């Protein structure tokens, strides 16, 4: 497994993904499994296309958005992505603190500080040391996750699965949305990791595939815990399974490895706000601590704000947050897919692209309207199809307008 695939495996091994999977309890085990697999296959396709846009243009995710939306448009999405990343840092640290507190009672604030400090330490390790430690941590997380999965799903073998659900009733479409939401949240980040790879297409496919499989696994663990054991608190599941210290390791380091990706992408999005500046890269030989702090300062600030937010604000329910992410980034990637793979839109020097901006605004409004209704296929897919069609139609109409203007100009010049 390549270094980048290993990073994306770490992104998926997440308490937030397990808890989101547990939210699907109302669907039951079999329908929940179908929703998880189908939603993640859709998520894989969207992630891969987003990654390929960055590869195609040799740019990170947010700088690639300038190809469709113009430079100021890319600033807008970079700022929204930074806000999203701060939110994710806070949510991950909050969830990790609650779960860790259930195993070892140090206090919510102390656990938030511990996870936050470990995340910053992980950021500052540098590529050389972080890669070696990452392999060890990922292997241990993999082994412990296998054990956790076996303990939870042994309930099926022992006939402990209940046909009744204690969770809220959920439609297939609502469940599909929650399954797509996590992969969708990574769309503004995937190209940041893959566009500079030696084999970018294969690397993008491997990273997206690794994340999809591991994320599906985490969702299934959450679903299984909720349906089979009727227990959605991760700390209680681990305590009942006898995973005391090992459980703490899973909780803390799954959070740290995921938060590292958020911090790295915060660096990329921050530097995207300064297009003339070259994005600094960590040296394989390991730069000094001072240089590491300078390179990763946006990510460090992101982690500090997220840690403070986790201490101050309650963050138990992230459903509305996931839907907000969907309403922002589903139309965004739809416009980019239309431009890059259908219309073959060429980059211009405009500050704000009117067609892309109008398409995104309409797509955002459509998403929020669709949320009021319950569709079998959810509302991300209908929203994306409509936004792509709107973008293609507006681009074609704009092209026809410019052609007609050129003909009129040529005709008047002739006479």
Image: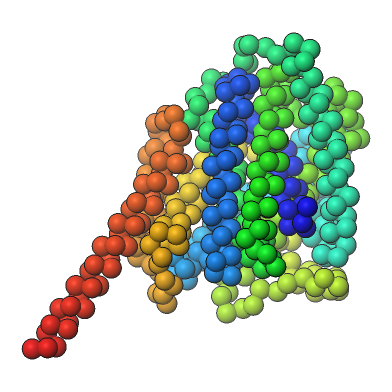
Residue at the extreme left of the image, as rendered: 415
Residue 128 visible to the viewer: yes
> Residue 109 is drawn in which quadrant?
top right
Question: Is residue 199 depicted above or below 379 in this figure?
Answer: below
Given residues 374 and 117, the one toward you in this image is 374
Identified at 70% across, 35% down, the residue is 217
| Count of number-bearing discs | 0
Is residue 322 shown to the viewer in this render?
A: no
Is 165 displayed left or right of 171 in the figure? right
**At which x and y percent is residue 114?**
84, 48
Please name whichever residue, 361 or 376, is drawn nearer the observer in this view of the structure.
Answer: 376
Which residue is found at the position 51% from the left and 60% from the top? Answer: 77
Q: Residue furthest right?
A: 245
Identified at 55% across, 66% down, the residue is: 56
Q: Is residue 285 left or right of residue 365?
A: right
Q: Is residue 168 left or right of residue 296?
A: left
- Residue 157, position in %: x, y? 77, 15
Q: Residue at x 77, y 56 (%)?
A: 2
Image quarter where the C terminus lies is bottom left
Specify how the rendered protein is coloured: rainbow
Residue 397 drawn at (x, y percent) = 26, 62
Nearer-the-camera pick, 272 or 79: 272
Q: Is residue 179 above or below residue 363?
A: above
Residue 197, position as x, y percentages in the image:
69, 66
């Amino acid at each position: 497994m390549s270094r980048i695939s290993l990073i994306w495996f770490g992104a998926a091994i997440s308490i937030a993904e397990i808890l989101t999977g547990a939210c699907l309890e109302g669907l039951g085990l079999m329908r929940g499994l179908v929703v998880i697999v189908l939603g993640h296959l859709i998520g894989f396709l969207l992630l891969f296309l987003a990654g390929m846009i960055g590869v195609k243009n040799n740019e990170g995710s947010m700088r690639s958005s300038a190809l469709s939306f113009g430079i100021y448009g890319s600033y807008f999405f970079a700022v929204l992505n930074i806000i999203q990343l701060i939110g994710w840092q806070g949510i991950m640290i909050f969830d990790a603190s609650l779960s860790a507190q259930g195993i070892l009672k140090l206090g919510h604030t102390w656990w938030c500080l511990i996870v936050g400090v470990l995340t910053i330490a992980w950021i500052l390790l540098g590529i050389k040391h972080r890669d070696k430690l990452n392999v060890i941590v990922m292997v241990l997380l993999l082994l412990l996750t296998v054990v956790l999965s076996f303990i939870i799903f042994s309930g099926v073998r022992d006939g402990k699965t209940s046909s009744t659900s204690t969770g809220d009733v959920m439609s297939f479409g609502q469940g599909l949305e929650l399954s797509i939401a996590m992969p969708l949240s990574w769309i503004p980040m995937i190209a940041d990791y893959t566009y500079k790879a030696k084999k970018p297409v294969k690397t993008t496919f491997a990273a997206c595939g690794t994340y999809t499989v591991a994320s599906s696994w985490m969702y299934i663990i959450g679903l299984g815990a909720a349906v089979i054991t009727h227990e959605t608190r991760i700390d209680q599941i681990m305590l009942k399974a006898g995973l005391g210290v090992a459980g703490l390791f899973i909780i803390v380091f799954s959070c740290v490895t995921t938060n590292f990706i958020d911090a790295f992408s915060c660096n990329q999005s921050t530097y995207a706000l300064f297009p003339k500046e070259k994005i600094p890269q960590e040296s394989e030989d390991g730069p000094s601590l001072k240089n590491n702090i300078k390179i990763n300062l946006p990510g460090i600030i992101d982690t500090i704000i997220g840690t403070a937010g986790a201490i101050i604000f309650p963050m138990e329910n992230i459903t509305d947050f996931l839907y907000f992410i969907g309403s922002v980034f589903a139309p965004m990637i739809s416009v980019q897919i239309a431009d890059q793979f259908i219309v073959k839109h060429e980059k211009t020097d405009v500050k704000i692209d009117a067609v892309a901006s109008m398409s995104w605004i309409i797509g955002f409004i459509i998403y929020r309207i669709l949320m009021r209704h319950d569709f079998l296929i959810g509302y991300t897919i209908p929203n994306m199809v409509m936004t792509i069609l709107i973008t293609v139609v507006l681009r074609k109409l704009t092209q026809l307008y410019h052609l007609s203007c050129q003909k009129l100009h040529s005709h008047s010049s002739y006479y």
